[in-house]
Amino acid sequence: MKRAEIILTDERKPQHLAIILDGNGRWAKKRNLPRLMGHRAGLRKLEDMVRLVKREGIRYFSVYAFSTENWNRPIMEVTGLMSLFRYYIRRKVDEIKAEGARIRFCGRKDRLPEDLLEQMKWAEDYTADQKILDFIICINYGGRAEILDAVNSLIQSGHQGQVTEEDLRKHFYLPDVPDPDLIIRTSGELRLSNFWLWESAYSEYYFTNIHWPDFNGDELRKALDDYAGRERRYGGLKK
Ligand code: FPP
């Protein structure tokens, strides 16, 4: 049996796969295109990836689409990205729903344009009954912001006494979503950049030099095969 045909058993397959979609700008630069064309190509790749991830039987798929730090980019790029998010929701949500996927957004709601927030809420409600895949789009997300927001929300809830991890987790943006098992980062950077900061405590990492718009099914398979061969000990000893 060829390696690509091996079907991963549940234990060796990530339940939650997260991807840091990096390298759209460099992909565009290599082709003498504006950066926004790179983001567009990245979005097309993401559409394929949702289907591939679903086919792999992964239950949660999250992507880092816009960080709390990305507001520092030139205004043209920020507004271009906001328009891409609008386009995606308007045009692609039916396809996502037909795949049995539920869309969820994760991040701070401040600073995002009002009409986009309305669209995001609509897309979440419209796909809420889908159960095969949770497709989580992190927009205006930062791990530090999430921890701070959780702490403040916990204080506001009137919590008394010692705070446990479970107490805090209840105040995260998506408390029911399991921690990412595997985090892929494309385009050669070896860092987390404030993604799933708390939740990644025991995540496995997979880094590739490929720019996000060039990522494909074979690359995904490589990452999943690599993950399947790892031993996760969570601070314990070898089984
Ligand atoms: C990082 O590449 C990528 C981003 C900040 C944006 C990613 C967004 C998309 C792929 C569109 C997603 C759309 C939806 C609806 C989820 P970079 O610009 O930092 O690349 P560089 O490091 O090469 O400059």
Image (spheres, rainbow, N blue to C red):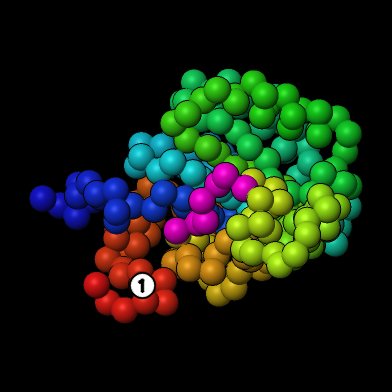
Q: Which residues are magenta?
A: 175-181
Residue drawn at (62%, 48%) of the image: 175
Q: Indicate the position of residue 166 as horizontal and vertical percent values.
A: 61, 58
Q: Is residue 121 above or below residue 210?
A: above
Residue that badge 1 annotates: 233
Task: Tell me if mark 1 has few (under 14), some (14-19) or many (20+) residues whose alpha carbon lies within 10 angstroms of its own.
Answer: few
**Magenta stretch: includes residue 88:** no
- Residue in the foreground of this view, choosing between 176 and 184: 176
Q: Is residue 134 above or below residue 78?
A: above
In the visual, does 76 lie left or right of 55?
right
Image quarter for residue 168?
A: bottom right
Q: Is mark 1 within 8 Å of ligand 1?
A: no
Residue drawn at (66%, 57%) of the image: 167
Residue drawn at (42%, 77%) of the image: 235
The reply to whether residue 129 is in sight is: yes
- Our reading of the magenta stretch's main secondary structure is loop
User: Please, what secondary structure does the residue beneath circle 1 have?
Assistant: loop
Q: Is residue 219 above or below residue 80?
A: below
**Magenta stretch: includes residue 179:** yes
Quarter of the picture holding the C terminus = bottom left
